[in-house]
Amino acid sequence: MKQPEPRGPVSSLLLETLSGPEQRTSGSRELIAAVDEAVAATPDLAFDEDLQLTLFCLFELHYGGIDGVDDSWEWHPDLISERRRLEQAYESQLRSAVSLPALPAPTSAGVAAGLFQLTGDDGGPSMSRYVAKTASEEQVREFLIQKSIYTLKEADPHTWAIPRLTGRAKAAMVEIQADEYGGGVPERMHSALFAQSMRGAGLDDGYGNYLDAVPAITLASSNLMSMFGLNRRLRGAIVGHLASYEMTSSQANRLYARGFRRLGYDDATAAYFDEHVEADAVHEQIAGRDLAGGLVEAEPALLEDVFFGAAAAMTVDTWMTEHILGAWTAGSSSLRTSSTVSA
Amino acid sequence: MDRRQLVVAYVVDGVRMSATQRDAYDDDGSPDSGASPSRPLSGPRQTIVAFPDGPLLVRGDFDIVDPDGKPLRRSRKTVALCRCGASVLKPYCDGSHKLIGFKTEPES
Ligand code: FES
């Protein structure tokens, strides 16, 4: 991924530190002091440009890396320490903001039914209905840009969970992920289908190329999954997160496909959305019963975290949708800079 | 070892589905002791999971064909077949069963 522009003192210090060689000693301690100060001062971490970008870059070291940054920075203790401080603050913000439903019995059937109910009750604003009926060409391009931050690496954050699962839950996760990764056909990978949609809409399909354009809340949505996926302690939450994504996907993607066709885009551009209608109708069943249900039957203590992960996914994505639709209905762009959006 | 082949065909939503089943039975006709009833390791046996209030999930080695035996469009290994009738992607499920409140059990 190319180096992003810093958005404040913490991200600027981080990017500056990363551009040098890894320091084996604790030369980057001032990073930690800067993070502590910024975390204490921020009114809302989910919407904090500087801190969400910092967290995004710290996670990126575990994915594809950042151009010009030495790979050996990945496990530097000061960076891990910085990441943990941000994760703890973000997790505690979400633990208090997210309301959990009454928890079902810790059985596969109970967990599946509870998750279907939670995800079916979503009364938030609907991006998919807006795209289907109202969005302009400019707005659907923005929508793709916002979505590209996660979707060009679709499935990767949940894959971190595989070695932390066993038995039925693991087999279910692998079955879902194999399908996400195209079942052995690179062009069918969901991230590749999404890149094809971006090209079809005249956009750059390089991973992270629109990073500078997207607001903090878009990074917060991606960071949520990376945090759940990279912490074994939160394996219940990443499983719940995936289940909620699968369960809210089929109908939404049918509407997205309709919106793209309404605007005259071709089948290749809509293919990503068409694919998800069918794929996620399969995945949601496996995710509810075998993945989430199987995990809770094996580890009943994770019941609450499964529902926390699902509810947190919905909460953060509702914030993101509110931000985007809010900007559009006010007649402005949902991006930080629209200069990057060229057709 | 000489294995038998078993072909299963039945009708789902007007579409005949045939499943070619290999290796699931030993020579004496008794079920293969190695086959797991729910999650095959190497695809020796097909399973159809009937999800409450939802689709039929079919896993394993099988073909989905029309009444003339022509293969239908298929883009994944494990498929969900609609049994509520509301899908616009039949024979596959598209999640519409949730919108119409499809119930597999009669309300008690
Ligand atoms: S069973 Fe899912 S749409 Fe019919």
Image (cartoon, coloured by chain):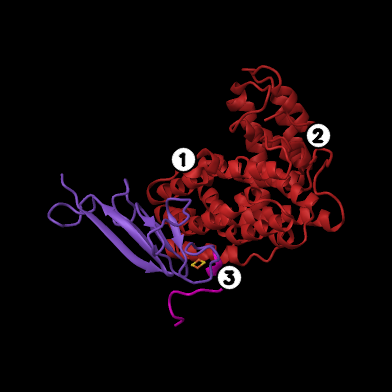
Chain letter belonging to callout 2: A
Residue B93, percent from left and from top = 50, 63
Write the start and end of the magenta stretch as one range.
B95-108
Secondary structure that dominates the magenta span: loop
Chain letter belonging to callout 1: A
Instruction: Determine which residue is flagged by label 2.
Output: A8
* A126 left or right, relative to A327: left
Instruction: Determine which residue is flagged by label 3.
Output: B99
The verdict on a common chain for dots 2 and 1 is yes
Label whose residue precedes the other's in the sequence (2 or 1): 2
Instruction: Determine which residue is flagged by label 1.
Output: A184
Q: For residue A202, which quarter of the picture?
A: top right
Residue with the most extreme right position: A331
Cα separation, mark 3 vs mark 1, equals 32 Å
Residue A184, percent from left and from top = 46, 40
In the rendered image of the structure, the colour used to display chain B is purple
Above or below — where is A170 with respect to B98? Answer: above
